[in-house]
Image (cartoon, helix red, strand yellow):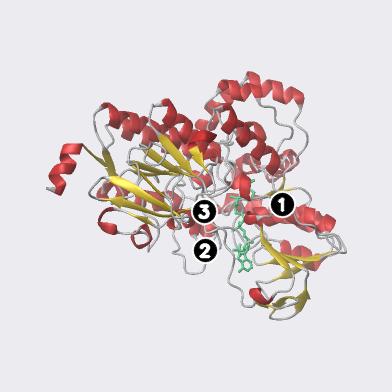
Amino acid sequence: MNDTDPTRHPDVLVVGAGFAGLYMLHRLRGLGLSAMVLEAAEGAGGTWYWNRYPGARCDSESYCYCYSFSRELEQEWEWTERYPQQPEVLRYLDHVADRFDLRRSIRFGRRVSTACFDDDTGRWALRTEGGERFTARFLITAVGCLSAANIPRIPGLETFAGRWFHTGRWPHDGVEFTGQRVGVIGTGSTGIQAIPVIAEQAQHLTVFQRTANYSVPARNGPMDPALQREVKATYDEIRRTQRASTNGHPFVVSERPALSVSSQERRAVYEAAWERGGLRFRAAFADLLTSKEANDTASEFIRGKIRQTVRDPVTAEALVPTDHPFATKRPPIDTGYFETYNRDDVTLVDVHRSPITEITRDGVRTSSASYPLDCLVFATGFDALTGPLLNLDIRGTGGQTLRERWSEGPRTYLGLQVAGFPNLFTITGPGSPSVLTNMPTAIEQHVDWIADCLAYLRERGLTRIEATEAAEQAWTSHVTDAADRTLLPMATSSWYLGANVPGKPRVFMPYAGGLATYTTQCDQIAASGYQGFALTTPDDAQRRSA
Ligand code: N01
C-alpha cells in the first residue's frame, strides 16, 4: 500500500456528501489541503439522496434552503416552488457537486464501518464495509442528524407477506400503491407529508398514530417570479437576517408577547400566520417557546383548526395533540394533511390507546383489532443526532469508543468536538443548534469555523486540536440549561430528547440558545486562540509518546 497516496491518505477525510460534506470539501480545497470524502450512497445529496418517499419536500422555503457561499450560485439557480420537492433539492446538490468539480474527491459506495485514532501516528484510520482503508490527520463527520433510520422492533415483521419500506430508505424507482391496502406508521413531519399523497393512490390507507401532532398548512405553490427577482436582488440582506436569527430562517420573530395583545388581536395574528403558512407560524409572538401561557394560545388555535377541518368528531379528537405544547417537537407543515381524514378510504388508528402488538403475515395487529395490509410504510423517523455518529464506531485515544463515552447521552464542546477524540470535528453534532435551525445555515457556520480553525493550526505548525474535559463539561451543562430556559423539554415524546428510540438516554441534544448567540460564542472562542481546546505541535506529540 502506498502510504503517500493522497486519495487514500489525505490531510482530511470527510464522511458524507450531503449539504455539509460538499461544502466542507470545497473549503478544504480552498485551503490547499488534500481531502477525500467517503460516502455510503452511490450519489451525492445525503438526506435528499435517501428520502424519496411520496410527498418528500423541504419545509424551509427554497430560496433560503441553499448555500450562501457563492454569489454566482445564488444568482444562477432558479427554484421552481416555494418548498422544493426532494428531486429538486437533489438536482441542486448534484449541480453543486458538478459546478465546483467536487466528485473527483468523493468515493461513493463507501460506508465507513470503523474510525480509530492511532495514538502513535496521530492519524485517524478508517475502514469501510468493503474492507478499504484510509487514513488522515483530521476526520470531519458530515453524516447528517437524521440519517440513521429508526425501524421499530415490532414482533413478526419478518413474517409479513406484503412489502414494507422505511421512508428514509425509499426505493429509487418508486413504489406503486394503486389498488393496495397501505398502512403508514408514524405521524411526524415525514408521515404528514407522505399520508395525503399515498392516500391519493392507495385503495385504502390506514394510519397508525401514536402521538397526535400539530401541523400548519405549508401553502406551497410555484415560485413567484417577482419574489425570485426580489430574493436575488436582496440576498445579502436575507443572509444577514438568517445568520442573526435564532433558527437560521429569513424571518424575524415578533417582539410582542402573546398575552400583551387582546384575544381578538391575537386571533387575527394567528389567522394571518395560518393563511401565510409555513414554519413562520412560530414567529407570530415572541414567547411561544418560553411561556406556557403564551404557547397555550397558539396550541389551542391549531387544535381549533383541526376540529374545524376534520368532519368526524371522534377522528378529529384523536388528531388533536394534547401531550405537548406546539413547536416543542419539530413542527410539521403540510398540504392537505388533516383534510385527508375526511376521505372514506382513510382510517386513523390510535396506537397510543391500542398499541401495535405484532405484525402478522397479513398486516398489523393492535391490542384491539387486526388491519389487513398489502404494504406497510414506516414513517418512524430516525435515531437522531447521535445515531449516525455512533454507527461509525468511532474510537479515540486509548481505544475508548464514542459509544462508551456517550453512554449517558452526548457530551461535546460546541457540538464540534469530543474530549479524547483529537482532530475529530462533527458538523452539526449534538450540542450545536443543528436541527433547531434551517440546516444549510447551521452547516455553513460550522464548515466555515472548522475551515478557519484548520487554517489557524497550519499557520502555527500545530497538528492536533482536542476539546478539554473541562470545556466539554461546561458546554454540556450549558446545552441543558439553554433547553431548560425553553418549553422544549416538555415534549417528552420528542426525538430531540431521544425518546423515540427505546433505551436511548433521555437528554436534550441540540443547543437551544439560538444560532446567532451560538455563532458569537464560536467566534469569540476562535478569536481567543481556541479557548477550551488543547492545541499541540509535533514536538508535543513526540514528548507525549517518549
Ligand atoms: O420522524 P419523527 P420523521 N410505534 O420521529 C412514530 C425532519 N424532516 O421522519 O411521536 C408507533 O418526527 C412517532 O410517534 P411518537 C424533521 O426535522 C424534515 O417524521 O414517537 N409509532 C412519530 O409519530 C423531522 O422532525 C423534512 O410517539 C411510532 C413518527 O413515528 C425529522 O425529519 C421533512 C413508533 C416519527 O416521527 C423526523 O421526522 C421530513 C412505534 N414503535 C422530515 N416509533 C424537511 O422538510 C415511532 N413512531 C426538510
Q: Residues within 10 Å of mark 1 (few under 14, many from 20)?
A: many
Whether disc 1's CB lies below 8 Å from ligand 1 is answered yes
Instruction: Give the vertical position of 301 relative to 180 (above or below).
Output: above
Whether disc 2's CB lies below 8 Å from ligand 1 is answered yes
Disc 3 target residue: 488
Q: Residue 193: which disc?
A: 1
Q: For mark 3, give the secondary structure.
A: helix
Instruction: Give the vertical position of 271 relative to 458 (above or below).
Output: below
> Mark 1 belongs to which amino acid?
Gln
Which sits in the foreground, 90 or 114? Answer: 114
Disc 2 target residue: 499
Which sits in the foreground, 135 or 394? Answer: 135
Which sits in the foreground, 101 or 229? Answer: 101
Which sits in the foreground, 192 or 391? Answer: 391
Of pointers 1 and 3, the one earlier in the residue sequence: 1
Q: Residue at x 65, y 57 (%)?
A: 188
Whole-percent x, y for residue 404 in the image:
34, 62
> Mark 2 belongs to which amino acid?
Ala
Ligand 1 shown in quarter = bottom right
